[in-house]
Image (spheres, grey):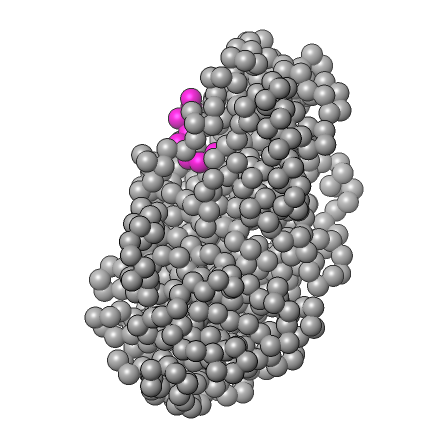
Amino acid sequence: DEVVERSGALLATAVTPEKTKYDMELYGSALSYDHRCFYICGRPTWVLAADFDYWRIPVPPNSEKADQITDTWRRVLLQYKAAGFNAVRIRFHWGFHSPSKGKYDFTGNRDVNQLLLLCEELGVLVIACVGPYIGDDVQGGGYPFWLIQRDHIRLRHLKASGVKIWDDRFAAAEGEWYDQLISMLVGHEVVTKSVRGRGCILMVQLENHLGARGALELPLALQDETRLLARMARERVIRAPLATNNLRWPGDFTSLAARTWVAVEKKLRAYHVIKGAYHLDISGFTVRDIADSPVDVGAVARVTKGDNVPMAALELYKPKGESTTGSFSGQVEAALSQGLSVLSLPAYFSMGSWGNIDSPLKCQQGDSGYSAVSADGSLSTDARSTRLVLHIARAFELQIASSDRVTSRPWITSASRPTVRGMSVSGLPSDAVRVRRQWETAATSTTRVQEQQDESKEDEDQLQMTLAAYVDGQSAAAADSELAFLFTLAGAPAVAKGHSFALTGTLGPRQRGIFISNFVVGSESGGQLTLVAASKEIYTRVALDLGVEVWICAEESIQSGQLFFDGECQVSGHAEVEIVDVDHARDRKFSFVIPKPGPGVATVIGESGATVHVVLLAQQDLDTLVVDYGSFDYEKDKHGETTGAMSAAAWGVDGILMTGRGSVELAQTRANSASSVVVVSRLQPQCCAGMRFLEDSADSAYHGHQFIRYYIGETSEQPDMAVRG
């Protein structure tokens, strides 16, 4: 066997965090990050992922042609996109590609390059988990059998339980795997390739559950493992940020424990018991229940030496059981409210019966109803709730991804326009409401952030300052109870019980809610409409024109609430309006928009002409709401500025995709002669075989609007219907 250079003092001194860290200065214009989120070409971005195990996906019989395999992958990836995810975590399986020593297969359903090209085409970001160990849910942890069977090699340098001694031969085998795999990854990194503006690989995860700390969680483990993998990745020209996924989540530790940990490590280093600590760019963690165990961001930073990096839950599990917190939707909402900007959900899509390389333990346990999406693509109630949460996150990602938590310390005291600076909910404990504030203006880079920090605070009120309030009402069992949402305006003294004005609303079936304040539609040159506050959840936004958007919400019996706009607005359709004053708000008028019961469409026109059409969906329509997440680039206004709104949405279908040719494609997999499809878009899709376009549908609650179009299936057997514009 080939022998690589030994570990110890040489490796520890040659491989330091500074020598393997991501080069922000060189690649920051394409990809940067801080403790809030990632910035892709300056655009704030959440990484919302689920595990995509390509080696578990069965290919059709006799599918020797590459396009047949690609079509299979495409259908599965479109399921992920339809579920609301913008990224996947791909665990590259060493054993799947290497049947025997020295032999590697990257053809057919093992064609990594083709898979990454497909992700770029569909606009799916990738967390590349290169192993070599990828998890205990796979036979041998992903190692090839020829390596496992070699008794003289210590896998993961493990001699006995909890005891590791460096093994040169195992390190050489890891290098062989990296030689084969990484050469196919480097051409697809976000920082180096331009496909619709960028490649797909956002970050590279080395190993999994390596355990950088030993007994009693002290820093006594063999850190040279991570050093060597990082060095090999950089030597093979990986430029993306490097991450690792630790088994324990330091956020569970108290601040005292975290400080004690740091003190103990300092003593051990002073007495030369350990060498200098090593860490990668991003330290990810496995989280079992983030809803019941909130993150202590300060403790995480102290433990991981994370100076200014995003918090990442690379394996975010839901707790098993029937508890109300035991849902994927609850875990995702809790993660976003606590400031995590990277998350991946293992086993969200049921793949337990896909392929035959699961670990015996998992085969024995089965899915047990854990997965949110079944192997045939059917969505559970939890998956539909999670999709709505992801829709909200992506609809307002531009405004709230780069956000900080609002504390009791006032962050803004005055503004040139009505601006909410704080929010609470009557009847709920203070820790049930987490308010996060937008930090920077849209599409600005981290360089601009630093400039803003250095500038005078006089310009602070020129920022949009969008707020997102995450409300958890489970402790009060407030699903159907009407709550009072209390808002405080900057520059307007609190006049009643510490707030400026109040809205009422419910939290709906999830018993949680995400509510937006200080949101502006349009531009200063073309006219603006400002949403001051809302107790109504806005699930997605579709841009029709500059200053004209469609907001999709639930009808009142599902989740009731109001919208509070600045100025005297004209309101027509399925809502009523009251023009009101707010004490001490500089004699301004406000429009209090109250939706009517049942599904329908309400139109709100501001004083400048900026318009919002509020579509209130019935439950059966909300359950099938899908949004066009077809590319990396979101809708832009006439000046080329990204608005964050989407280009199309639909209900009654399983997926929607805006193609590069400007057409709209809808996916419908249910065989149903009565299948009807409703599309919201400024484009007018044309029919193809199996679909019939309706000029209007008089019996629909949404009829009478040009941006809403109707289609109906004409055949009883139509397994894959589509509409193309």
Quadrant in which the N terminus is drawn: top right
Q: Nearer the viewer, residue 87 or 27?
A: 27
**Which residue: 42% across, 54% down?**
402
In this picture, is 116 found above or below 466? above
Q: Position of residue 318 (x, y in %)?
A: 67, 53
Q: Residue furthest right?
A: 364
Observer able to see residue 393: yes
Displayed quadrant of residue 248: top right
Displayed quadrant of residue 428: bottom right
Magenta stretch holds residue 241: yes
Q: Nearer the viewer, residue 682 or 338?
A: 338
What secondary structure is the stretch in magenta mostly built from?
A: loop
Magenta stretch holds residue 259: no
**How many numbered marks have been drawn onto this rendered protein structure?**
0
Q: Position of residue 315 (x, y in %)?
A: 61, 44
Displayed quadrant of residue 53: top right
In this picture, is 422 found above or below 347? below
Q: Nearer the viewer, residue 256 or 245?
A: 256
**Which residue: 40% across, 88% down?**
581
Magenta segment range? Answer: 235-242
In this picture, is 160 found above or below 242? above
Q: Position of residue 118 (x, y in %)?
A: 43, 44
Q: Nearer the viewer, residue 589 or 675?
A: 589
**Which residue: 59% across, 28% down?**
266
Q: Position of residue 527 (x, y in %)?
A: 25, 75
**Which residue: 50% across, 50% down?**
341
Q: Is residue 7 left or right of residue 613?
A: right
Quadrant in which the C terminus is drawn: bottom left
Observer able to see residue 118: no
In this picture, is 716 found above or below 296? below
